[in-house]
């Protein structure tokens, strides 16, 4: 399945909960992927951090490749790295179907988005809480996904910032009908309904899934709340 087809089918299935694998058991990665598939997830979200653009360092292409080998589901690769244009082709080759870059991390956002699209992957833009929507409005035509961060990228233990609700509502009026609106950071039973009401269709979820003993129940409950 090509990246555009993956995106279109997932958009049609909204609301979609995407597990962020940062909190999974990497010692049993394939088992975790299988368990999540059995729980009914329809895509995976991979957070790549470089220790430069953000203060934390996570993983790179080998983990993307490992997840690709373990699943046929779409992989949504969120690059929290500086100058992401240097690695677009590499992450596509590793198996990413969607590659999202931060508006704050590159001096050539349009060129980076076009480079992503040229690989056959879907192109996404992410913005931190402090970045105005106006920063990315000139290049919304060059992306297929917009990711609104409700916490500062790369920092753990932050509370959900309600400015994300304002941004989701604003972006809903600006993006094309076939562009996906995604939200990440502090998403759980207490916040997902507000994000959905503001226009979000995809919800990146970490602890609300991985700190549960029942992945299937957690995913189903979150999607149920987002559908109301």
Image (cartoon, rainbow, N blue to C red):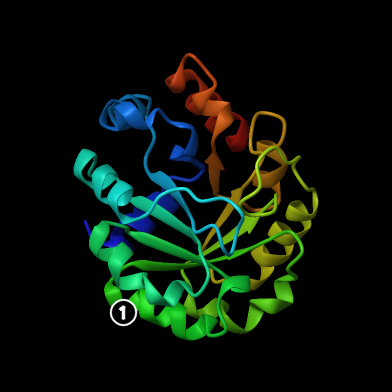
Whether residue 211 is situated above or below residue 11 in the rendered picture: above
Residue 52, x across and y down, in percent: 56, 63
Q: Residue at x 38, y 60 (%)?
A: 98
Residue 37 seen by the camera: no
Q: Is residue 178 left or right of residue 4?
A: right
Name the one closer to the observer, 49 or 205. Answer: 49
Q: Against 154, is 38 above or below?
A: above
x and y, in percent, of residue 95 in the image: 26, 56
- Give residue 6's quadrant in the image: bottom left
Residue neighbourhood size for the residue with mark 1, other residues' Cα within 10 Å, grouped as few (<14), some (14–19), many (≥20): few
Q: Name the quadrant containing residue 28.
A: top left
Instruction: Give the number of marks.
Output: 1
Q: Quadrant of the C terminus?
A: top right
Q: In the rendered image, which residue does mark 1 sit on? A: 118
Q: Residue at x 58, y 36 (%)?
A: 227
| Up/down of 73 relative to 175, above or below | above
On-image quarter of the N terminus? bottom left
Q: Quadrant of residue 71?
A: top left
Which residue does the image show at 55% across and 24% down from the upper left?
A: 221
Image spot of residue 220 (x, y percent):
49, 25
């Amino acid at each position: 399945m090509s990246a555009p087809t993956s995106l279109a089918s997932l958009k049609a299935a909204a609301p979609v909960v995407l597990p962020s694998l940062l909190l999974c058991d990497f010692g049993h990665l394939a088992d975790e992927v299988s368990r999540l598939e059995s729980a009914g997830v329809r895509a995976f979200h991979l957070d790549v951090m470089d220790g430069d653009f953000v203060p934390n360092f996570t993983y790179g292409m080998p983990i993307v490749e490992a997840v690709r080998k373990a699943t046929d589901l779409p992989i949504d690769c969120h690059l929290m790295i500086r100058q992401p244009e240097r690695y677009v082709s590499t992450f596509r080759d590793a198996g990413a179907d969607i590659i999202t870059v931060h508006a704050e991390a590159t001096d050539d956002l349009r060129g980076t988005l076009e480079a992503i699209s040229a690989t056959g992957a879907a192109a996404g833009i992410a913005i931190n809480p402090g970045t105005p929507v106006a920063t990315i409005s000139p290049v919304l035509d060059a992306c297929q996904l917009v990711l609104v961060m409700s916490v500062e990228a790369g920092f753990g233990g932050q509370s959900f910032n309600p400015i994300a609700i304002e941004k989701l509502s604003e972006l809903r009026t600006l993006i094309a009908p076939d562009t996906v609106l995604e939200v990440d950071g502090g998403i759980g039973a207490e916040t997902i309904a507000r994000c959905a009401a503001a226009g979000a269709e995809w919800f990146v979820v970490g602890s609300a899934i991985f700190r549960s003993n029942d992945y299937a129940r957690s995913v189903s409950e979150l999607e149920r709340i987002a559908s109301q």
